[in-house]
Image: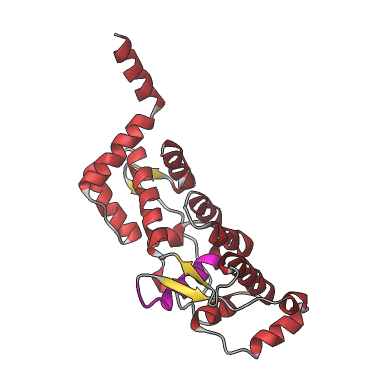
Amino acid sequence: MRSLISKYLDVLKDHQVTAHGVGARHRDLPSPIEGGRYLNNYTKLELSLSERELEKAFSCLSLPSHWTEIQNHIGTLKFLELWRGLEEVRTGHRLRIQVCKLKDKHLQMTTDEFELWLDSKRLSKAWFEVYYLTSPEQYRFIWKTLYDVAFYPGRGTLRVYVPLLNTWNTHLKHILMFSLLNAGVPKHKVSQHLLFWTGQTASQSRINLASKMITDLNPSNQNQKSGEMAL
């Protein structure tokens, strides 16, 4: 857990998080030609993060390895857009998308052939989101990655679980909470900053616990405790 906190604190180093709040560097995200269907769902904090900061945030997020593989392959920004697209088709707490059988002929097609083949298919809602946001080669990589995870001899229907997007939102909230506390923001003011930047709050008991964890992580505090024990 100590190493996880250290990773959290490294994400917003360039954000000038001080006792006065979050001095974020806002960046303008160009709206996609299609209209940016999911941009309205981004939090203020997320919109202010650079791609490098988003990558750092993902590096300390515990996603299943196959989704991490996909995120690394298509890039963080596109992966977030894809994740939001899949979230749009979620109808319950769990979302399992069906994975069609991948055959050698699909892998042997040229990019142009594969794109024409894709255009001719009636894709499910989830796979249409993948089609909508990726290139043919990226689509093929995602298909193969998820197929390899889902395939099991004798299994009739192949499905893969898609994590809740709220996992990511909560993760960013934790990053900001630890960063604020580490910068000396008074504990009673942390929750209002969390609400403004992430749209979520945290209980005072959770904030107090996070503050204690940071205090325990501080080397000077550890040295002081060691001295007290020696006495």
Q: Quadrant of residue 100?
A: bottom right
Whether 43 is drawn above or below 11: the answer is below
- Magenta stretch, main secondary structure, is helix
82 inside magenta stretch: yes
Against 13, is 220 above or below?
above
Q: Is residue 166 left or right of residue 137?
A: left
The residue at the point 35 percent across, 35 percent down is 214
Q: Tell me if residue 170 comes above or below residue 229 in the rendering.
A: below
In the image, residue 134 sits, relative to residue 193, either above or below, namely: below
x and y, in percent, of residue 36 in the image:
49, 77
Residue 166 is situated, as x and y percent measured from the top left of the image, at: 38, 63
Q: Is residue 186 visible?
A: no
Q: Nearer the viewer, residue 51 or 84?
A: 84
Left or right: where 119 falls relative to 16: right
Give me the residue at 29% from left, 35% from top.
212
Q: Which residues are magenta?
A: 79-92
